[in-house]
Image (cartoon, coloured by chain):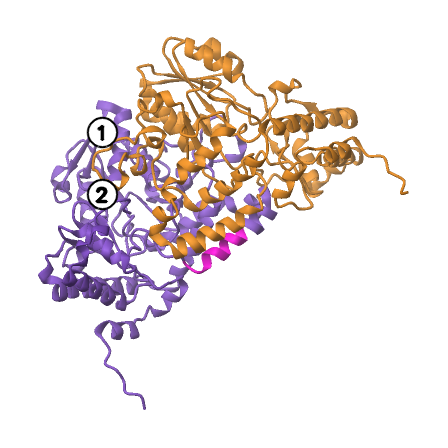
Chain colours: A purple, B orange
Amino acid sequence: MKPQSRQTAAEELDAHDPLRAAADEFVLDDCVYLDGNSLGRMPRCVPERLREVADGEWGAGLVGSWLHHDWINLPARVGGRIAPLIGAGADEVVVGNSTTVNLFNATASALGLGSRRRIVTDESNFPTDLYALEGLQRLLGATITIDRVPAEDVLRALDGNTALVLLSHVDYRTATVLDMKRITQETHRAGGLVLWDLSHSAGALPVDLNGCNADLAVGCTYKYLNGGPGAPAFTFAARRWHEKIRPVVSGWLGHKSPFAFDPVYEPAAGIRRLLSGTPEVLALSALDASLSVFERFDLHALRAKSLQLTELFIQQIEQRCGKFGFGIVSPRDPDRRGSHVAVAHDHGYAIMQALIERRIVGDFRAPNLMRFGFAPLYQRFSDVEACVGALEDIMRTGIWQAERFRSRAFVT
Amino acid sequence: MKPQSRQTAAEELDAHDPLRAAADEFVLDDCVYLDGNSLGRMPRCVPERLREVADGEWGAGLVGSWLHHDWINLPARVGGRIAPLIGAGADEVVVGNSTTVNLFNATASALGLGSRRRIVTDESNFPTDLYALEGLQRLLGATITIDRVPAEDVLRALDGNTALVLLSHVDYRTATVLDMKRITQETHRAGGLVLWDLSHSAGALPVDLNGCNADLAVGCTYKYLNGGPGAPAFTFAARRWHEKIRPVVSGWLGHKSPFAFDPVYEPAAGIRRLLSGTPEVLALSALDASLSVFERFDLHALRAKSLQLTELFIQQIEQRCGKFGFGIVSPRDPDRRGSHVAVAHDHGYAIMQALIERRIVGDFRAPNLMRFGFAPLYQRFSDVEACVGALEDIMRTGIWQAERFRSRAFVT
C-alpha cells in the first residue's frame, strides 16, 4: 500500500469540486491562467465549430446559408443563450457589435424614451463607457448633461432631470459588485432608467436583470463567457421598452422587413430593433459554441466556487505575503465581490511581470493594481496555491527588482 | 489527331483568361455562383487561418496574444491591406464594426468638423445608409436637416449649409457607378465633404479615393473582398482630417493610450482614433487571410475581366432572352457599370427561384430586379453562358410559372 501524502487545502478542494468536469471542456496548458476576466480560455468545441461554419456553411452553403443555416437569427438565438445567465427572457437579448457601440446606442436611444436630459455615471467606470458618453456629449453639446460621481454617490446625485444612470455592475479594477436591485429601484423612484454594463458579471456570477426590474444592459462576451478575442457584445432591453425604444444606430437588420429594402426605417418588433448591421456570423458561431458549456453547469454552483476561490486567495495572500506590503483592494464581503481580486502594491507592475515569467498570468492596472481573475468554470484551487507560492518566492528573493521587469511595454 | 471541337465564345475567353489561376484560390463547387456581390466565395486559405488563430493564438497564447500575435494592430494592419484596393494610404484605413456603425460614426463625427448642419444623400441609397441617417436625425432632431434627392440631383442640391454628402459609389441595385472625382470636387467647391460607401466597389473595381481627394469612406468586406459572412467593415479618413476629427462613437481602442485606462478620452494620433471597441480578432484574421489573395493579382486586370463578364452577359441576355421581356437596368456604358448586372422582369422573383433550383445563384430585389454578380477573381466566362442558357430554357418551357417558385420566403 502506497503511503498517502497529506493533501493541501487546495488539493482537497479540487478533489471535491463539483464543477471539476467543467475544466475538461477547455483547452488547458501548463500556465496558471488568472486572466479569464480579461480573455476567457477557449472551449474545446470552438475550433470544430469554426471549421463547420467556414467549410460547411460559408464555403459550401454560400449566400443560401442566411436561410438554410439560419444565420439571420444568430444574434437573437445567441442572445437567447446568454439570457438565462443574466436573468433575462430569451426574447430580451441580442448579440452583435462591440460593448462600446452597444453602450452608445443604448444610451443615445434611451434619451428618446423621455424628455429628461441628464446622464449620471460612476467616475471610475470602465474608460470605454466614459468615452462613449463623451462622444455623445460631443455630438449633443449643451443639450445634455453628463455627471460623473463616485459610485457610492450615484443615488444622491439623482434629480428630476436624470434620464439615465449608467453603471458597471462589477468594477473592472476592484471587483466591487453594486447593488443592482436597490440602485435600479431608487432610480426608478426618481423617474430615471438604469443601463447596466455587465462585462465583468456575465458568466461569473448570477445576474438577475428582471428580478431587479432592470431597463437596459450591455456586456462583453470574451471574458467569463469565453467567446473569443473581440467576440460580439450583447444588448438587453426589458420587454416593456421593446415597442417604445427607437434605436439611434439604426440599421437594416433592425428593420421589420430587412429584405424589403424599404427606404424608410420601420423598427422590427421586439428586441430585434436593436440590431443594426449584418450579423458577425463567424464570431457569433464561435460564441454560440462557447456558451453551450454553460448549459451543463449551474450558475449558483459557479458563484459558490468563485467565492471559495477568491476567499482562499485573499486568505493565502494575507497569511503568506502580508509582510511584503500587499493590500487587498477588493471587498472582503463576498456579496460585494465579483470573480477577480485586486491587490495593490507600489511595485505591482514589476511583480506581475515576474509572475508572468513563471507562467502565472494575471494583469496590471495603473497605478498600482494587480488583478487576479478566477473563472470558476476552469479554475482549480491549486492555481491559487501556485500563484501565492510564486508570489511569496518572488518577494522573498527580491527577484522582482530585476531590470527586465521594469520596462513597460504593452500591458493588457 | 483528335478533332478539335469548336469552342464557344465563353470557353475561349476562359482559356485565355489571364486571371485563370485566381479561381484556384477559392473553394468552388458545382454551383454557378453569381452572388459574390452579396457574399463572396471563401478563399481556401481561410479555414487554416481560423484554425491557427483559434488553437495557436487564442487557445495557447491567451491574453498574451494581444502583444505576441499583434492582435492589437489587426484593425490597422488589415486596413493597410485594403488601402491599395481603394486608392488610400496604408495609414488611412482601419477595419472594425459593421458598415452601419461606421457610417453612423463617420457621419456624426463629420458634423463636428464644421458648423454646417445639412446632409444630402441619394434617395435610392442602400437602406442601411438611409436608416443610419434617420437614427442620427432622431437623436439630433431639428438641429440637422437630411435631404434625400435622386442621385443625379445631388450636385444641384448643394447649398451653403451642406456639411456632408453621403453616397454609395456603386448602386446596390443597378450597379451604376457615380463619378467620384467630379462629385467630390463640386461638393468641396460648395464647402461640403463627401462620405463614400464603397460596399459594392471595393475589390470589384479600382477605387481612387486619394486621386479624387475624397474625405471619408466606409465599406463592407464580405462582398467582393470575400471576408466572410458579417465580416468587419472598414473606415477611411483622408490624412488631412486625422488630427481634426473627433469620433462620436469613441471607445477605448481609439484612445491614444488604451492601456492607461485614462478616465478622459484623448484621441489616438491618425486613423486609429476612429477605432472604438475591442477588435474582432477571429473575423479580422479571416479577412486578413482573404485579402492576401488580392496581392497576387492586378486590380486593373480584375476590372477588365469584370467588364468583359458583364458585357458578355448583357449581350447574351439580349440575343437569347430578348423576346422574354427582360430589361437590362444596369448602365450600358462600361465606365458607369459596377460588377453586377440588374435585369428587370415582372416575374423576376419566380424566375430567380427557378434558376436557383438549377444551382445558378443570383438574387432578387423588389419589386422586379434580378441581380447577377460577377466577381472577377473566381468567375468563369462559362458561368455567364450556363446562366443565360438556363434562363432561356426556363423562359422557353415556362417552368418558372410552377407553384413552387411563388412563395416568398426569405430572400437574400
Q: Quadrant of residue B387?
A: top right
Residue span colored magenta: A43-53
**Any mark on residue B41, and which?**
none
**Of the pair A360 and A297, the residue shown nearer to us:** A360
Tell me where residue A22 appears, x and y as whole percent. Answer: 37, 66
Whichever of callouts 1 and 2 sits on the residue coming sooner in the sequence is: 1
Q: Up-down: is B10 above or below B332?
A: below
Subunit of label 1: A
Three-letter code for the amino acid on which mark 2 is drawn: Leu
Quadrant containing the N terminus of chain B is top right
Chief SS of the magenta region: helix
Is-magenta flag for residue A50? yes
Tell me where residue B139 appears, x and y as whole percent. Answer: 32, 26
**Of the pair A221 and B9, the residue shown nearer to us:** B9
Q: Up-down: is A376 above or below A155?
A: below
Task: Name the element at disc 2.
Answer: strand
Disc 1: which residue = A117
CA gap, disc 1 and disc 2: 17 Å
User: Pointer 1 and pointer 2: residues touching (CB < 8 Å)?
Assistant: no
Disc 2: which residue = A167
Q: How many marks?
A: 2
**Of the pair A305 and A173, the residue shown nearer to us:** A173
Q: Nearer the viewer, mark 1 or mark 2?
A: 2
Tell me where residue A129 appears, x and y as whole percent. Answer: 26, 39
Tell me where residue A334 appears, x and y as whole percent. Answer: 18, 60
Task: Name the element at disc 1.
Answer: loop
Subunit of label 2: A
Classify residue B158 as left or right of residue B33: left
Classify residue A87 as left or right of residue A26: left
